[in-house]
Image (cartoon, rainbow, N blue to C red):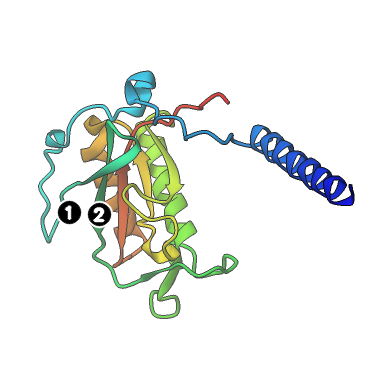
């Protein structure tokens, strides 16, 4: 009799545990398989407009110096993204450390006294110039570049500003080059070309 009662209590505890697991799964994402990836056709703005072939600017050591677009998978399987690395010609380096702004974070600072510029300073300058020329709808974002790993150290984030249409690529590359020269930067900066992510309703 005692054994039957013990088995009954064990069965009740097991049942309660299973119910709690089901409730927990329902409260969070769910216990079933993950939903299929949203196709870009369900989110047209996720697609980059135009093609890399629309870049007519020619890279040169004396002029704008950049690498061919790197293609990678974006947030949607059928909507690739692109990253273009632009090379600086100056002597100052980009500082990716976590620190407060200081007197060196200006474009006209003495390169001997201030050999480094914080990435936010040059980044905001590039972004400001791009939005002023191309418009806020055509140029946005300062941060993780397309094709980069968000788990990597900050200096490997391929920092960049972003456009959504290759018809703006030539002008965007000229702007980045002009800002790197203005700040006397010898490090690289990036241009990401990607679509706009759609919000997914839960």
Nearer to the camera, 148 or 50: 148
Mark 1: few/some/many CA within 10 Å (<14, 14-19, 20+):
few
What residue does disc 2 label?
Answer: 85
Residue placed furthest toward the right: 2
Nearer to the camera, 152 or 33: 33
Q: Are marks 1 and 2 in contact (CB under 8 Å)?
A: yes
- Where is residue 158? Give x, y as percent: 35, 57
Q: Secondary structure at mark 2?
A: strand
- Where is residue 105? Give x, y as percent: 49, 65
Q: Secondary structure at mark 1?
A: loop
**Picture residue at 19% right of the left edge, 46% below the top:** 69
Residue placed furthest toward the front: 1
- Looking at the picture, does residue 40 appear above or below residue 182? above
**Picture residue at 21% right of the left edge, 39% below the top:** 170
Identify the disc placed on residue 98: none
- Looking at the picture, does residue 144 appear above or below residue 106? above
- Where is residue 186? Give x, y as percent: 29, 67
- Looking at the picture, does residue 132 appear above or below residue 99? above
Label 1 or label 2, whichever comes before in sequence order: 1
- Looking at the picture, does residue 98 appear above or below residue 68? below
Quadrant containing the C terminus is top right
Residue 151 location, quadrant:
bottom left
- Where is residue 129? Give x, y as percent: 39, 43
Cα separation, mark 1 vs mark 2, equals 5 Å
Identify the disc placed on residue 67: 1
Q: How many marks?
A: 2
Classify residue 101 as left or right of residue 23: left
Classify residue 74 as left or right of residue 95: left
**Picture residue at 40% right of the left edge, 65% below the top:** 155
Classify residue 123 as left or right of residue 176: right
């Amino acid at each position: 009799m005692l054994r039957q009662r013990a088995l009954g209590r064990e069965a009740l505890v097991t049942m309660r545990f299973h119910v709690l697991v089901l409730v927990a799964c329902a409260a969070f994402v769910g216990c079933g398989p993950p939903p299929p990836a949203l196709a870009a056709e369900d989110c047209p703005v996720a697609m980059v407009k135009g093609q890399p072939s629309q870049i007519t600017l020619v890279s040169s050591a004396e002029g704008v110096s950049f690498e061919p677009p790197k293609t990678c998978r974006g947030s949607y399987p059928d909507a690739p993204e692109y990253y273009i690395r632009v090379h600086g010609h100056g002597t100052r380096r980009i500082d990716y450390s976590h620190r407060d702004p200081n007197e060196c974070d200006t474009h006209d600072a003495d390169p001997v006294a201030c050999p480094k510029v914080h990435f936010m300073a040059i980044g905001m300058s590039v972004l400001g110039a791009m939005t002023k020329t191309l418009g806020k709808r055509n140029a946005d974002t300062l941060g993780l570049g397309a094709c980069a790993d968000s788990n990597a150290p900050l200096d490997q984030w391929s920092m960049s500003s972003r456009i959504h249409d290759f018809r703006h690529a030539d002008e965007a590359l000229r702007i980045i080059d002009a800002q790197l020269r203005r700040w006397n930067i010898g490090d690289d900066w990036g241009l990401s070309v990607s679509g706009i992510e759609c919000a997914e309703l839960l």
